[in-house]
Image: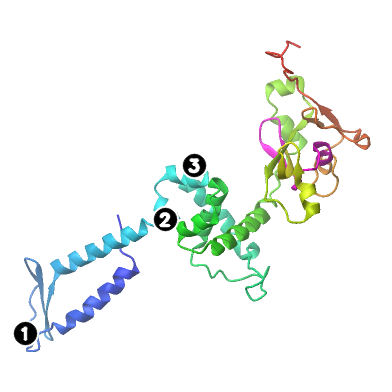
Amino acid sequence: DFLPSSFIDKSKKNINECSRIRLKSSATPVEILPLTTHTGTITSNSTSTQTDIDMVSLTAMFSKLSLLEQKVFNTVICIERFENNDYYINYYTGFKSYKIFEMVFELLKSYYDDHFVMYSTRVECGLQNNKLSDTCKLSKINQFFLFMIRLRRGTDLQELGIFFNISHSTASRIIISWTRFVYSVFSSIRIWQSREKVQKNLPFEMKKNYPSVRVIIDCTEFEIEQPKNPQAQQNTWSNYKNTNTAKGLIGMSPNGVVSYISSLYGGATSDRALLNMEGPGSLIELLENGDQVMSDRGFSFDRKFSHLKLVHPPFLERQPQLSFD
């Protein structure tokens, strides 16, 4: 299954050049005869020369080169190594198969020329935030593979550098660049569903008990590095997580499809404040008159949003099971 690379092709060229030295200096024009094969040797006769090539030696040499190249291939991580192994694709990226991984990459690649900006530090000739030609030796698909490993496994930069045979600073640049690129592409995709679509796909129990619910919301937060700025430290401190966090509002339609993702804010921001934020991209701007929002009791609307209603599902509240009502 292994195909020799250009490295082996170059070796063939060198061997062919060496083989010319072995031409018989006393070769004389002879009659053209059919190709004859002897054990381990092919004799080629022509009017100009007669060449003997030891095919056994050549085959052995190419086999050895193939084994050496395969050994090198197996010491690094690259997407080509796992094209036929969906288990490891899922392990490293979260995608269920290589086919799905490839489909997502092809979608992103169609936006690459217009949206991708290679991140660079100030040290790099002051070219930060300028569009740069990608000087990294990794192909685009392997850069995406590295990005997904970081996203899925949380692998540190030093280890990623070893995996892909690059420096940890190059790994960092790739991750920052692809994070910005993927966000710019996917954030432009509208996931908010119309009221008609939500109503059409309401589950039976929701249609029976909460027919006007447009979205089910909750907040999520995740730990971040502690900012150096004291004010930023204060804004991102979460009493709930007891660390510095970034926090966002997530919404899903009653049939379970994610339909809203807010921007991220500091962990000190309350659930109520996130819900009542106004402006482009806010949930308030998307909701329509008469819409209901399902949430836990930590949320509430400001009075000026009286055209909207919050509903709270029943909770156990330390009871062994929910009551019939």
**Image point 73% across, 33% down: which residue?**
198
Residues drawn in magenta = 251-275
- Of 285 and 266, the residue lying toward us: 266
Disc 2/disc 1 C-alpha distance (Å): 50 Å
Query: How crowded is the residue under tag 3: few (<14 C-alpha within 10 Å), some, or many (20+)?
Result: some
Q: Amino acid at mark 3?
A: Lys
* Nearer-N-terminus badge (3/1): 1
**Residue 244 relative to residue 273: left or right:** left
- Element class at badge 3: loop
* Nearer-N-terminus badge (2/1): 1
Residue placed under numbered mark 3 in the picture: 96
Whether residue 111 appears in this view of the structure is: no
Residue 18 on image: x %, y %: 20, 80
- Element class at badge 2: helix
Residue placed under numbered mark 1 in the picture: 30
Residue 129 within the segment the image draws in magenta: no
